[in-house]
Image (cartoon, helix red, strand yellow):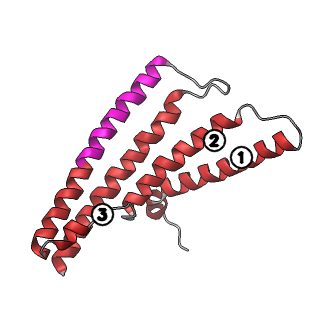
Amino acid sequence: MKFNIKSILINLDLFCAGLALIVLVAVSFATVVSRYIFDSPLMWSEEIQVLCFMWISFLGAGVAFRYGSHVSIEVIVDLLPKAVRRYVELFIGLFVTILLIYVWYLSVVYVQQSIMLEKVTTILEIPDWVLCSSLTLGLTSMVIGNFAVTVLNFKEFGKQ
């Protein structure tokens, strides 16, 4: 396996989601051990678990967009003639990209509001924007991934 800057940057969201998954499993295991063996629950564990779960979910969604792994129902599109199908798939890809950009904008506004309000979690006092920024970064990855897949599919379809 060859590591270079380009492959690291391309897979940064996958690496961060994997790291968050490792932390989630470790904290969950420590919580179970603490509660059932030492009869002393870790009060802060739920906040870490929610934080990790959000980062895993949104970064993982970006990875799924990049690999074209999201569920889609293509029954109607597959019935169309090839020439029409190409443009319908392009339209759908661009529409989804535009929708994701709009939701990304809303997430940026939400993160800015979280920063201004200085809201924090109850026990660990983690700033709320740390949780919310997972949505913004995940959506950034989704926009880039969906647009790239749309363009590649359009180019590939033309070669067939």
Q: Nearer the viewer, mark 3 or mark 2?
A: 3
Q: Identify which amino acid the numbered label 1 is placed on.
A: Ser
Q: Secondary structure at mark 2?
A: helix
Question: Quick one: quadrant of the C terminus?
Answer: bottom left
In the image as oriented, which residue stretches furthest toward the bottom? 160
Q: Is residue 8 left or right of residue 22?
A: left
- Placement of 100 over or under 76, stated as above or below: above
Q: Are marks 3 and 2 in contact (CB under 8 Å)?
A: no
- Magenta part, dominant SS: helix
Q: Nearer the viewer, residue 11 or 36?
A: 36
Bounds of the magenta segment: 98-117
Q: State the mark number for residue 28.
A: 1
Q: Residue placed at 63% from the left, 41% from the top?
A: 49
**Mark 3 packing: few (<14 Cα in 10 Å), some, or many (20+)?**
few
Q: Does 109 lie within the magenta span?
A: yes
Q: Is residue 154 above or below residue 143?
A: below
Circle 1: element type: helix
Q: Spatial distance from mark 3 to mark 2, Cα to Cα? A: 33 Å
Whichever of labels 3 and 1 marks the residue nearer the N terminus, that label is 1
Looking at the image, residue 73 sits to the left or right of residue 31; the answer is left
Q: Which residue type carries mark 3?
A: Ile
Q: Which mark is residue 49?
A: 2
Q: Which residue is mark 3?
A: 73
